Amino acid sequence: MPYYIFKINPDQTTEYLDEAEKYPEARGKVRDMRMAHIKDDGTVYRMVFAKTVGQGETLITPGHREERIIGDD
């Protein structure tokens, strides 16, 4: 399963940006994106390990933790 990289905008909308097969590669991409983003507007860059882009987006969506099904790890 790949690591999916998302941008979470200040209005809490998510935007798929990229993916990487290995953790160090994904971590490096996210760090580079964070360093390149110079505005302090509340934008967040995150990566998530998931089967699909859709599942990854669900996992990083704010409020997802309250909707988790027990055993849905």
Image (spheres, rainbow, N blue to C red):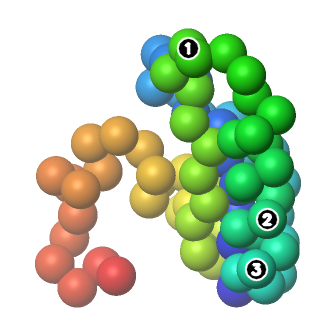
Image quadrant where residue 69 sits:
bottom left
Q: Label 2 neighbourhood size at 10 Å, few (<14), some (14-19), many (20+)?
A: few
Type of the residue with mark 3: Pro
Q: Quadrant of residue 17?
A: top right
Q: Is residue 55 above or below residue 72?
A: above
How far apart are labels 3 and 1 at the CA level?
Answer: 27 Å
Q: Is residue 60 above or below residue 20?
A: above
Residue type at mark 1: give it: Asp
Would you name the residue on which mark 3 appears? Answer: 24
Gap in Å between the C-alphas at discs 2 and 1? Answer: 22 Å
**Residue located at (76% from left, 80% from top):** 24
62 is higher (above) or lower (below) than 42: below
The N terminus appears in which quarter of the rendering? bottom right
Give the SS element for disc 2.
helix
Q: Give, as a three-letter code, the residue at label 2.
A: Gly
In the image, residue 58 sits, relative to residue 24, either above or below, namely above
Mark linked to residue 41: 1
Q: Give me the residue at 46% from left, 52% from top.
A: 60
Q: Label 1's element?
A: loop
User: What number is the disc on residue 28?
Assistant: 2
The residue drawn where x is 47% and y is 16% is: 11
Residue 54 percent across, percent down from the top left: 61, 56
